[in-house]
Image (tube, rainbow, N blue to C red):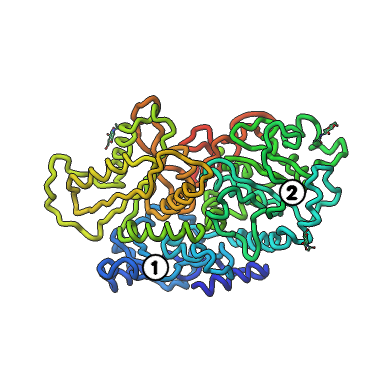
């Protein structure tokens, strides 16, 4: 499988005729056949023989007898591909830890040829993660391979980089575009926000034939592997800009350039834009800054060699509102809600230190369960969301949605049914506090569960408070986000970027714990998210095509309000 993935990648790189995406073992029919065989051939074997060497795939139940009739040659013509919008059927399949990666190159997303020892997670992720039902488009793969070449050509100390450095002075941009143009990103805000803003910056670079270079901050290189082969995305230590303390009052801020008429988007004043422009897109940006998302503004920015990209938000939905970008984006992402799913798995590979933490924890506490439930709890205000309310809310949500089994609250005695080894659930809780964990664990310790289900509850850390930019904290936070992404089912807190990263990497549409207000239990306690994409929390409210302020959720069908943040914007494929 891996050889063929590499094969396909090279063809994409050469730009030659592209093979059809569906390999036989990826078709639903083939999977059914394989599952049926697996069921007949390995009854319980995997479970009995331990978790580390189970067969490739084992179904736990829930497959219907009728699927046997669907057996057919995997090479028969297939109906046009249907996006697996509903991921629910995925949950009946159990994937143990495998000895070999199941989809080493993530459907061609990853280039071959990286040194495997310096970044074990890159090619090992699918030993732990089930294969994604969402395949990257061939066009996206082509864009990524082109990007990688461009990055190598324009990386620090190349001729292209050296000749572009003088333009960091912010003087007039050259008439003729420079060969290498850059997006500079630097870490700001919590780790979840950083991952989302960095993904946004990368997509912007992909769309505009730019190269993304990042400031390593305190811990970026300790958390993540290099994402691009044979080069680096880290700014060199001798990069002329050492302090990225740009702010709203900076004269090179795009919004200020516009309002001071230092930049002309209608081409009337004949002056070139500055060669360095600061894109100020934080949650408190103003209407002038929001013009960044509009078509004429992007046309001017094309000429600027150095763009400093500053946001703590997932601004990607804003790119889909741009009519120049949208056709290209739709070719890259025919399934629009997979943007973060694909780019996140392309960019963010845990460093070996973090990978060690992830895999040790996974093998010790989560691997042997037939189903893994991730519960991510983030409380923004203990006044609005006191402990008693949130812990009740979690229990109400997980029981009502059938995510966790009911207990018999009237007795401490063991129930009549014996434990059924096919009904084991491991619950992974991530929270700054240990109270929710204690409560859930005690509930399943003190009372029997109907139907032989066994529930184990685990929480890796409880740091008591968020500590931005502290390496040991961020290592654990990153490990926890990744562990969440290995779950089968997720319950996440509204408005938490930590949860978005887990759901996006995992390709999971979570249940969202509705934010309690004024200490009141919300009703319903949780709702199912409409898409696995992160939410753009502080979206642009300038509607480019109408040249006025308004609600950008009404402009195109695939950008709507988020369920967890009612004013936010997100990408969806389902239309309500
Ligand atoms: C770019 O500049 C660096 C240091 O200024 C130098 O070491 C390097 O050789 C230059 N690269 C090229 C391709 O000339
Ligand atoms: C903006 O324009 C004014 C007047 O034309 C000029 O003095 C100033 O230097 C310009 N600022 C920038 C950042 O280009
Ligand atoms: C908890 O769930 C039940 C359904 O199982 C529902 O009827 C009830 O209203 C919920 N309670 C609260 C406080 O939301
Ligand atoms: Mg809409």
Answer left or right for 440 relative to 260.
left
Identify the image quadrant of residue 311. top right
Residue at image mark 2? 240
- x%, y% of residue 426? 31, 53
What's the CA distance linking mark 2 and mark 1?
47 Å
Q: How many marks?
A: 2
User: Compared to 171, does 419 lie above or below?
Assistant: below
Residues 175 and 189: in front is: 189
- x%, y% of residue 29? 41, 67
Q: What label sits on residue 138 in the rendered view?
A: none
User: Compared to 76, does 504 lie above or below?
Assistant: above
Residues 542 and 574: in front is: 542
* Mark 2 and mark 1 residues within 8 Å of each other at the beta carbon: no
Answer left or right for 41 relative to 298.
left
Residues 371 and 519: in front is: 519
- x%, y% of residue 149? 69, 63
Q: Residue at x 49, y 35 (%)?
A: 565
Q: Secondary structure at mark 1?
A: loop
Q: Is residue 203 visible?
A: no
Of callouts 2 and 1, the N-terminal one:
1
Q: Secondary structure at mark 2?
A: loop
Residue at image mark 1? 98
Disc 2 CB within 8 Å of nearest ligand 1 atom: no
- x%, y% of residue 147? 67, 59
């Amino acid at each position: 499988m891996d050889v063929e993935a590499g094969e396909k990648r090279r063809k994409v790189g050469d730009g030659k005729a592209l093979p059809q995406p569906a390999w036989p073992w990826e078709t639903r029919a083939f999977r059914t056949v394989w599952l049926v065989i697996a069921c007949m051939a390995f009854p319980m074997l995997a479970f009995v023989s331990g978790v580390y060497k189970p067969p490739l795939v084992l179904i736990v139940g829930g497959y219907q007898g009728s699927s046997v009739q669907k057996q057919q040659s995997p090479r028969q013509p297939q109906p046009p591909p249907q996006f697996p919008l509903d991921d629910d059927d995925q949950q009946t399949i159990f994937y143990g830890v495998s000895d070999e990666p199941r989809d080493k190159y993530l459907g061609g997303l990853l280039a071959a040829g990286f040194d495997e020892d310096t970044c074990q997670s890159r090619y090992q992720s699918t030993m732990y993660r089930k294969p994604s039902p969402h395949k990257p488009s061939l066009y996206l793969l082509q864009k990524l391979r082109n990007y990688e070449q461009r990055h190598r050509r324009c990386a620090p100390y190349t001729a292209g980089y050296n000749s572009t450095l003088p333009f960091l002075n912010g003087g007039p941009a050259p008439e003729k575009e420079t060969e290498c143009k850059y997006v500079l990103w630097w870490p700001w805000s919590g780790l979840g926000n950083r991952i989302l803003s960095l993904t946004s910056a990368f997509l912007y670079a992909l769309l505009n034939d730019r190269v993304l270079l990042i400031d390593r901050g305190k811990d970026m290189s300790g958390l993540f592997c290099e994402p691009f082969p044979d080069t680096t995305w880290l700014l060199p230590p001798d990069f002329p800009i050492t302090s990225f303390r740009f702010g709203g009052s900076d004269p090179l801020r795009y919004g200020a350039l516009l309002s001071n008429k230092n930049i002309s988007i209608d081409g009337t004043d004949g002056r070139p834009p500055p060669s360095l422009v600061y894109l100020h897109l934080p949650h408190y940006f103003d209407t002038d800054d929001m013009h960044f998302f509009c078509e004429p503004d992007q046309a001017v920015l094309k000429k600027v060699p150095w763009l400093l990209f500053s946001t703590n938000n997932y601004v990607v939905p804003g790119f889909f509102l741009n009519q120049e970008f949208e056709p290209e984006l739709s070719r890259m992402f025919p399934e629009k809600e997979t943007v973060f799913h694909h780019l996140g798995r392309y960019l963010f590979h845990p460093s070996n230190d973090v990978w060690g933490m992830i895999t040790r924890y996974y093998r010790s506490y989560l691997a042997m369960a037939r189903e893994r439930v991730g519960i991510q709890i983030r409380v923004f205000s203990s006044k609005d969301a006191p402990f008693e309310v949130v812990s009740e809310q979690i229990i109400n949500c997980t029981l009502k949605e059938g995510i966790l089994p009911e207990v018999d609250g009237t007795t401490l005695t063991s129930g009549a049914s014996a434990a059924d080894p096919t009904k084991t659930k491991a619950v992974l809780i991530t929270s700054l506090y240990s109270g929710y964990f204690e409560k859930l664990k005690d509930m399943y310790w003190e009372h029997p569960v109907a139907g032989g289900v066994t529930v184990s509850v685990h929480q890796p850390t409880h740091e008591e408070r968020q500590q931005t930019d502290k390496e040991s904290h961020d290592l654990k936070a990153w490990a926890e986000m990744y562990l969440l992404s290995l779950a089968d089912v997720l319950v996440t807190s509204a408005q938490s970027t930590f949860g978005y990263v887990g759901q996006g990497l995992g390709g999971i549409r979570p249940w969202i714990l509705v934010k309690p207000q004024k200490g009141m239990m919300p009703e319903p306690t949780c709702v199912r998210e409409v898409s696995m994409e992160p939410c753009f929390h502080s979206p642009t409210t300038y509607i480019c095509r109408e040249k006025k302020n308004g609600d950008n959720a009404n402009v195109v069908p695939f950008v709507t309000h988020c369920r967890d943040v009612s004013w936010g914007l997100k990408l969806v494929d389902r239309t309500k």
